[in-house]
Amino acid sequence: MLVLSGLSLDEQDPYRRFATELGLLFQIVDDILDVTGSDEELGKPSGSDERHGKVTYVSLFGLERARELAVGSTRRRWQPCARRAGTRPRSCRSAISSSPASPKWEHSGP
């Protein structure tokens, strides 16, 4: 868990945008896997989103466009914190951990 207490709203913004982009990426990939994965891989029946009439990235945009959106989201997820730290996205993780405004990471749960 990431604790943002003690950071100003401006300092929190890159972490919040990163979390939003990561959540979006997770959803797109989940929608893709529901169409392309096996029951064994998913741990649930594949195609369940369609059977339940759920609107997904695949149903809205098609499989190939959903894959493109996932790639774009992957590229964008590090950009907010990289811009804040003044680094390239690849070095964002190390910039976050060495930043004076770096939030505390706490483990909670099992």
Image (cartoon, rainbow, N blue to C red):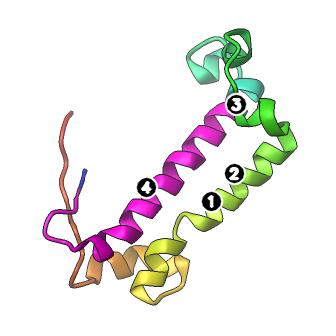
* Picture disc at residue 56: 3
What are the residue bounds of the magenta stretch? 3-31
**Above or below, comparing residue 94 to residue 43 in the picture:** below
Q: Is residue 18 magenta?
A: yes
Q: From the viewer's perspective, tell me whether residue 55 is left or right of residue 62.
A: left
Q: Amino acid at mark 1?
A: Thr
Near-viewer residue (14 or 93): 14
Quarter placement of the C terminus: top left
* Picture disc at residue 19: 4
Whole-angstrom CA distance, mark 3 to mark 2, is 13 Å
Whole-angstrom CA distance, mark 4 to mark 2, is 15 Å
Disc nearer the start of the sequence (4/1): 4
The answer to whether mark 2 and mark 1 are in CB contact below 8 A is yes
At label 1, counting other C-alpha atoms closer than 10 Å, the crowd grade (few under 14, some 14-19, many 20 or more) is some
**Above or below, comparing residue 64 to residue 7 in the picture:** above
x 21%, y 85%: residue: 100
x 46%, y 62%: residue: 18
Q: Amino acid at mark 3?
A: Thr
Residue lying at the far front of the rendered structure: 9
Near-viewer residue (48 or 9): 9
Find residue 16 and report its horizontal and vertical position in percent.
38, 60
Q: From the viewer's perspective, tell me whether residue 6 is left or right of residue 102.
A: left
